[in-house]
Amino acid sequence: MIEFSNWDILRNLLLAARWTVVLSLVSFVGGGIVGLGLLFMRISRSRWPRLFAGAYVELFQGTPLLMQLFLAFFGLALFGINVPAWLAAGVALILWTAAFLAEIWRGCVESIAKGQWEASASLGMGRMQQMRYVVLPQAMKIAIPPTVGFSVQVVKGTSLTSIIGFVELSKAGTIVTNATFLPFTVYGYVALIYFVLCFPLSKSSQYLERKLNVAHRNH
Amino acid sequence: MGYVFDYSWLADYWGVLLKGVLVTAELTLVGATLGVSLGVACAWARSLGPRWLKPIVATYVELIRNTPFLIQLFFIFFGLPSLGVQMSEIQAALLAMVINLGAYSCEIVRAGIQATGQGQFEAGWSLGMTRFETFRYVVLIPALQKIWPALSSQIVIVMLGSAVVSQIAAEDLSFAANFIQSRTFRAFESYIVATLIYLALAILLRQLLRGVGFVLFPRRSGR
């Protein structure tokens, strides 16, 4: 039997961790763009966009990410497209991330005092101008800590894409375990790499939240 | 799209789905009860416990919250046997869920304890209660009430996350969906049915937790 050193294991895991990072970034940026669209629909004054965005969020927050991945994987195939795992993984994660971000941001927009809307309306601003110049700049400040906090969920969510066959950190962990028969060591390292990716994000989210609270107290 | 949807397999396989639903429900109910209990214990340890215990609990919470549930599950099911700890798929799934929910609910409950005024503690002590009695009889229930909505969401998240336990062959709802699609080759249909059942379970669980909230906090629920 071939002997594997710790460095052999760790090196292969780190190579695969690049894909975890790439997929996380793609999902987060893509999800942010779709989420922004959903946010505008959710706080729109017409009824149908509001209902659609509400149903979308309920659907994606009320079902397991794993099922969403399977549905993207097998659902896209129904259109006759030969779906590579990375595409299904990207699509599902973007849609999933968008639902959560839209809901987080909606909370932030709604926490802006009603007087701000009224004041800007009385200055003759249109709905879009109100959003652009008055509400969003204030909401964005509140939104940063929970958004950074949610990025941790995105990084962890990418681990599920291993199940539909995308080779990232978790899948690499399974492959390396099957080659080395050292599940304790390998999954320990995998957990450690995830921790190294996520912990700074968690901490900065907490830091930003504290900083924001201090700013509020000084008012 | 020349695909014809076919749900005729439901007639033969509804029993498999039902069994899967029961396993998911059982995992969720037992996992949530034990997980929240662990969370309350950890929250007590982290905010009022002995000094040596605090860093241990903090490390546990950070380790769990910053690693994926899937890896925790694999570590428990595949990794721990090499230390001589053997367990069945269901036991491993349950243990992973309890440990996971324990860490999240620790932070949630701790926020509730911190939001409870210092005066409540002082009032308890001045009545001659011990630190533990004050926590149990004075602080805990109002603290839980404050964070009950957040705790409920976290329990729903853990229920949805439990779909992953099919990966260690615990026979829950997602396992049933995998099983059915491997028999009928109706992958999309079996996953869409399972997904809708999960959605129904999530809505049901949310209502159930609301009900539990009304029972646990009867006098205050009007506020």
Image (tube, coloured by chain):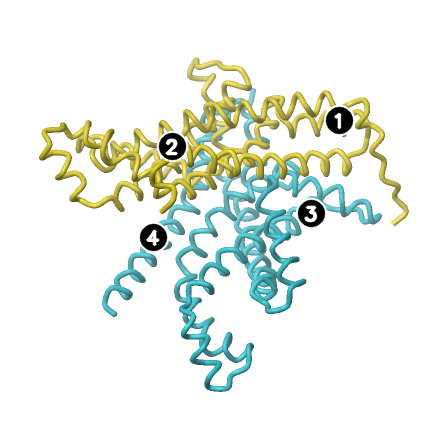
Chain colours: A cyan, B yellow
Disc nearest the viewer among 4 and 2: 2
The outermost residue toward the bottom is A124
Q: Nearer the viewer, residue A209 or B193?
A: B193
Inspect the image, locate mark 2, and give the three-letter code of the amino acid beneath it. Answer: Leu
Q: Position of residue A14 (x, y in %)?
A: 50, 43
What chain is tagged by disc 1? B
Q: Earlier in the sequence, mark 3 or mark 4?
A: 3
Contact, mark 3 vs mark 1 (Cβ under 8 Å): no
Q: Nearer the viewer, residue A99 or A77?
A: A99
Q: Nearer the viewer, mark 3 or mark 2?
A: 2
- The circle on residue B171 is none
- Per the image, the residue denoted by label 4 is A206
Task: Give amino acid for label 3.
Answer: Ala
Disc 3 secondary structure class: helix
Q: To which residue does mark 1 refer?
A: B180
> Closest to the observer: A11 or A98?
A98
Can marks 3 and 2 be said to lie on one chain? no
Name the residue carrying label 2.
Answer: B216
The residue singled out by tag 3 in the image is: A88
Secondary structure under tag 2 reads helix
Q: How crowded is the residue under tag 3: few (<14 C-alpha within 10 Å), some, or many (20+)?
A: many
Q: Are marks 3 and 4 on the same chain?
A: yes
Q: Secondary structure at mark 4?
A: helix
**Labels 4 and 2 within one chain:** no
At 43% from the left edge and 67% from the top edge, which residue is drawn?
A: A139
Q: Nearer the viewer, mark 3 or mark 4?
A: 4
Q: CA distance from mark 3 to mark 4?
A: 32 Å
- What amino acid does circle 1 point to? Ile
CB contact under 8 Å: marks 4 and 1? no
Give residue A134's position: percent from left, percent from top.
45, 76
Inspect this view and state whether residue B155 appears: yes
